[in-house]
Image (cartoon, rainbow, N blue to C red):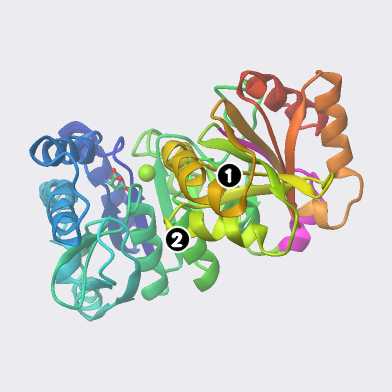
């Protein structure tokens, strides 16, 4: 007998018929002798619908008092899900009980709309499991010290599930979703993309932060910190698929590197179009300019990703960096009004039509020439590289957005990832 956490995404919970299917699958696992905790998302589209209602009433909810209400509204989608799933399980003849985050409780800090989990009390859940019940806990929501309801940010149910699995020392956390695992790249861009049977936790972390949307990045961080065995698999297999077969399907996130070392140097190609580039031209090249520019940006709560400073000519240099596209206009305005006059720079320019393409693989640690192979593949396609950034296990380039698909396909081929 094992303690298993299942997480079901919005699509898997998308209709009452699908919820009945989830119940049948969960019941199958429980009948095989496992203790089951299930963490579902809201039915697909529901969180968007709820937030649109809020926006309609108050277009610019920004103050903490307003964000508090956004969370009170957004969390209700999951509350409906857990109740429906519990009913569906009971209709299957199982004993089941649902809980909202505050009932467990799942305690978080008070940063509404992006709260962080601080602790999970597992006493109540354990008692239910011991009594033979399936326990269903809302994803996405928690409660702060003052009993205010919080949510964990969009896609936060993944993090709820992994956190519950960590707190309960579950034997495995299975993330059921609308894809059947983690792929070498997005199959919509490269039809030859392959499903990975295993991916290391570090690679998964890079891929999540680089824009692969399979798992919320915080859930991967949680899995790494607490070493939660995590598997991503499809919720669209027939619910009565053989359980041993099901338990081995999808992609397992591993913590063993040696095993992986034998495999491909590059495990995946990630890409995103979420960033924009800004450049401050003709900044006097002297100590303190990076701080003079990025300090202001950080103070405005804008995240910076790739940074590049050119060699200086005649005492002046150009300084470029990327930000999220949602912050693009704000960053340009800030640079023009505050940074340019303060530093005596010449001009601020920007480009929102860029994309970032990255190769990821822990094999890069032990192999040389991986980045140059990447550059070779891009040059063969005549793609100009605007910025480069590397870490131990990834290399990213910023290129013109219109070459994104071409670049991803070329790299997928160059690193032998095509099926
Ligand atoms: N329902 C929430 C959202 O749509 C949380 C989740 O699905 O993970 O973001
Ligand atoms: Mg999701």
Percent x, y of residue 326: 41, 38
Q: Earlier in the sequence, mark 1 or mark 2?
A: 1
Q: Is residue 16 left or right of residue 192?
A: left
Percent x, y of residue 418: 73, 27
Residue at mark 2: 299
Q: Residue at x 45, y 59 (%)?
A: 218
Percent x, y of residue 67: 19, 55
Ligand 2, seen in the image, is in the quarter at top left
Element carrying mark 2: helix
Q: Residue at x 76, y 31 (%)?
A: 385
Q: Confirm or deny contact between disc 1 and disc 2 (CB under 8 A).
A: no
User: Residue 57: which quarter of the image?
Assistant: top left
- Is residue 263 within the magenta segment? yes
Q: Using the rendered image of the protein, determine whether residue 396 is visible from the camera's viewpoint.
A: yes
Element carrying mark 1: loop
Q: Is residue 127 above or below residue 160?
A: below
Cα distance in 3D space between marks 1 and 2 = 24 Å
- Residue extent of the magenta highlight: 257-272
Percent x, y of residue 90: 12, 52
Q: Quadrant of the C terminus?
A: top right
Residue at mark 1: 210
Q: Residue at x 40, y 40 (%)?
A: 177
Instruction: Please name whichever residue, 17 or 78, is drawn nearer the observer in this view of the structure.
Output: 78
Q: Quadrant of the N terminus?
A: bottom left
Instruction: Please name whichever residue, 418 or 330, is drawn nearer the observer in this view of the structure.
Output: 330
Badge 1 crowding class, 10 Å Cα cut-off, few under 14, some 14 to 19, many 20 or more, is: many
Instruction: Please name whichever residue, 80 or 31, is drawn nearer the observer in this view of the structure.
Output: 80
């Amino acid at each position: 007998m094992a303690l298993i956490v299942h997480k079901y995404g919005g699509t898997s919970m998308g209709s009452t018929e699908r919820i009945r299917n989830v119940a049948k699958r969960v019941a199958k696992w429980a009948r095989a002798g496992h203790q089951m905790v299930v963490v579902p998302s809201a039915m697909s589209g529901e969180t968007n619908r709820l937030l649109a209602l809020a926006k309609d009433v108050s277009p610019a909810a920004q103050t903490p008092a307003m964000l508090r209400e956004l969370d009170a509204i957004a969390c209700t989608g999951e509350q409906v899900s857990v109740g429906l799933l519990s009913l569906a399980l009971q209709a299957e003849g199982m004993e089941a009980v649902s809980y909202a985050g505050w009932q467990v409780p799942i305690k978080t800090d008070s940063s509404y709309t992006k709260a962080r989990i601080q602790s999970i009390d597992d006493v109540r859940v354990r008692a239910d499991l011991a009594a033979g019940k399936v326990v269903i806990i809302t994803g996405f929501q928690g409660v702060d010290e003052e009993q205010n309801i919080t949510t964990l940010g969009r896609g936060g149910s993944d993090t709820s599930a992994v956190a519950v699995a960590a707190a309960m020392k579950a034997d495995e956390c299975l993330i059921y979703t609308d894809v059947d695992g983690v792929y070498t790249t997005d199959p919509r861009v490269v039809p030859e993309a392959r499903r990975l049977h295993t991916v290391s936790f570090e690679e998964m972390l890079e891929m999540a932060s680089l824009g692969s949307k399979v798992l919320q990045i915080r859930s991967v961080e949680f899995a790494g910190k607490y070493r939660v065995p995590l598997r991503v698999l499809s919720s669209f297999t027939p619910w009565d698929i053989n359980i041993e077969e099901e338990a081995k399907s999808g992609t397992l996130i591993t913590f063993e590197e040696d095993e992986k070392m034998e495999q491909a140097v590059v495990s995946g190609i990630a890409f995103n179009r979420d960033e924009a580039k800004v450049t401050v031209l003709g900044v006097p090249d002297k100590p303190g300019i990076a701080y003079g520019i990025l300090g202001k940006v950080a103070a405005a709560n804008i995240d910076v990703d790739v940074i590049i400073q050119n060699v200086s000519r005649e005492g002046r240099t150009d300084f470029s960096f990327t930000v999220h596209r949602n912050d693009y206009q704000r960053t340009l305005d800030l640079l023009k009004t505050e940074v340019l006059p303060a530093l005596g720079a010449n001009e601020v320019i920007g480009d929102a039509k860029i994309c970032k393409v990255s190769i990821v693989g822990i094999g890069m640690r032990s192999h040389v020439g991986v980045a140059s192979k990447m550059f070779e593949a891009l040059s063969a396609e005549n793609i100009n590289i605007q910025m480069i950034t590397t870490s131990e296990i990834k290399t990213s380039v910023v290129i013109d957005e219109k070459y994104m698909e071409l670049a991803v396909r070329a790299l997928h081929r160059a690193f032998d990832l095509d099926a």
